[in-house]
Image: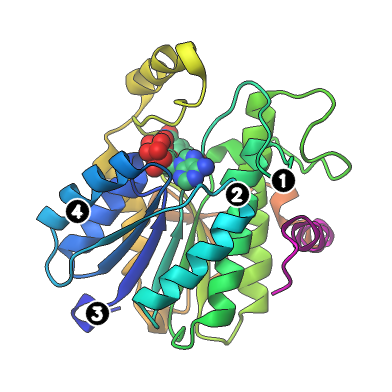
């Protein structure tokens, strides 16, 4: 993809960490960035940072709490006002919720924000945007998907909730959705890939009240620099269209096989049907 074509890139969770740094790296290469955040002040600060690196068109930052399906539907309308063309969509926003929290619909937060919101937003934009040829969908998964399964009878973990288990489930769902969406969009000109960006120093554990600083400090000790994590994401946006790479899992910069559970076709279909039901949206 030639950034000189003034391509548009949507990034969810663009106010912090890997999302913000990806926005900066892609703005530097000429992309028009539409960043999504959940807090006005953080959106303004991210806007200012990305603007400093902008080559072509000032970024736009839109406030949307991805745990609210009504806000996601409104957001998709607003995005259509800003652009009739989406070339890269980076489904990045997420959190780790160590205590059980519910979203506006009564769905557990990790499932809602990390996975279902992206299923819905991507679906809404796929349907509405006309110029979707040679576009790329990049889904943030994680090595955390390994040793996980989808708890189909209770994805919200009404029973036996465990925050890390729920996070791992949401990252497995991102991967399984990547595979089935890539199959569905085969030959459409839109590629869909997933990435584990590396263990990266970010604020991923910030949703845990007074324990957040300590938990994020742990990530700081073991994690790599955010520039590295973002370059593993932004690189996928630069894969030439004629390479036809779709339905793949990138472990940092290399394509790798994901867990056996993630490749189970029957469960991928089950996940798709469940997601349609929980989001109230059919692609
Ligand atoms: N860091 C790692 O080691 C690692 C490893 C593997 C995968 N990942 C994946 O990388 C992605 C980025 O995470 P990160 O590490 O960069 O974490 P981060 O710094 O906490 O960034 C998460 C982003 O998501 C946003 N967000 C959270 N809840 C939201 C909501 N309800 N509505 C809208 N936006 C919301 C956050 O907004 P605020 O700025 O308002 O908080 C922030 O911009 C995630 O998908 C994560 O699972 C990270």
Tell me if label 2 and label 1 are in contact, CB under 8 Å.
yes
Instruction: Estimate the spatial distance between the alpha carbons at disc 2 and disc 4, rounded to whole Å.
Output: 26 Å
Give the magenta-colored segment's residue range.
266-283
Instruction: Estimate the spatial distance between the alpha carbons at disc 2 and disc 1, rounded to whole Å.
Output: 7 Å
Q: In the picture shown, does residue 187 fall above or below 28? A: below
Left or right of 125 in this view: 152: right
Q: Residue at x 64, y 45 (%)?
A: 112
Q: In the picture shown, does residue 100 fall above or below 198? A: above
Q: Residues within 10 Å of mark 4 (few under 14, many from 20)?
A: many
Instruction: Estimate the spatial distance between the alpha carbons at disc 2 and disc 3, rounded to whole Å.
Output: 35 Å
Residue that carries the numbered disc 4 in the rendered image: 50
On whether residue 270 falls in the magenta region, the answer is yes
Q: Nearer the viewer, mark 1 or mark 4?
A: 1
Instruction: Estimate the spatial distance between the alpha carbons at disc 4 and disc 3, rounded to whole Å.
Output: 20 Å
Horizontal and vertical percent position of residue 282: 74, 72
Dominant secondary structure of the magenta stretch?
helix
Pick the quarter of the image with the C terminus.
Answer: bottom right
Left or right of 167 in this view: 278: right
């Amino acid at each position: 993809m030639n950034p000189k074509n003034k391509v548009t890139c949507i990034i969810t969770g663009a106010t912090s960490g890997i999302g913000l740094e990806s926005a900066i790296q892609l703005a530097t290469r000429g992309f028009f960035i539409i960043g999504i955040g959940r807090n006005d002040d953080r959106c303004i600060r991210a806007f200012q940072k990305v603007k400093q690196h902008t080559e072509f068109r000032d970024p736009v930052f839109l406030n949307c709490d991805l745990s609210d399906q009504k806000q996601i539907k409104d957001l998709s309308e607003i995005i259509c006002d800003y652009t009739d063309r989406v070339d890269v969509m980076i489904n990045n926003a997420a959190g780790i919720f160590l205590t059980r929290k519910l979203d506006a619909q009564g769905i557990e937060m990790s499932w809602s924000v990390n996975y279902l919101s992206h299923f819905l937003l991507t679906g809404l934009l796929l349907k509405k945007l006309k110029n979707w040829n040679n576009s790329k969908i990049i889904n943030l998964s994680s090595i955390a998907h390994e040793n996980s399964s989808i708890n189909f009878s209770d994805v919200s973990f009404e029973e036996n909730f465990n925050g890390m288990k729920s996070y791992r489930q949401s990252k497995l769902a991102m991967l399984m959705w990547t595979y089935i969406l890539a199959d569905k969009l085969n030959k459409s000109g839109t590629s869909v890939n997933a990435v584990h960006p590396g263990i990266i120093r970010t604020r991923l554990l910030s949703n845990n009240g007074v324990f957040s600083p300590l938990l994020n400090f742990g990530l700081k000790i073991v994690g790599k620099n955010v520039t590295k994590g973002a370059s593993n994401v932004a690189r996928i946006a630069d894969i030439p269209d004629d390479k036809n790479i779709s339905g793949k899992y990138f472990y940092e910069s290399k394509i790798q096989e994901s867990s056996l559970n993630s490749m189970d076709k029957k469960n991928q279909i089950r996940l798709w049907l469940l997601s349609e039901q929980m989001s109230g949206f059919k692609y």
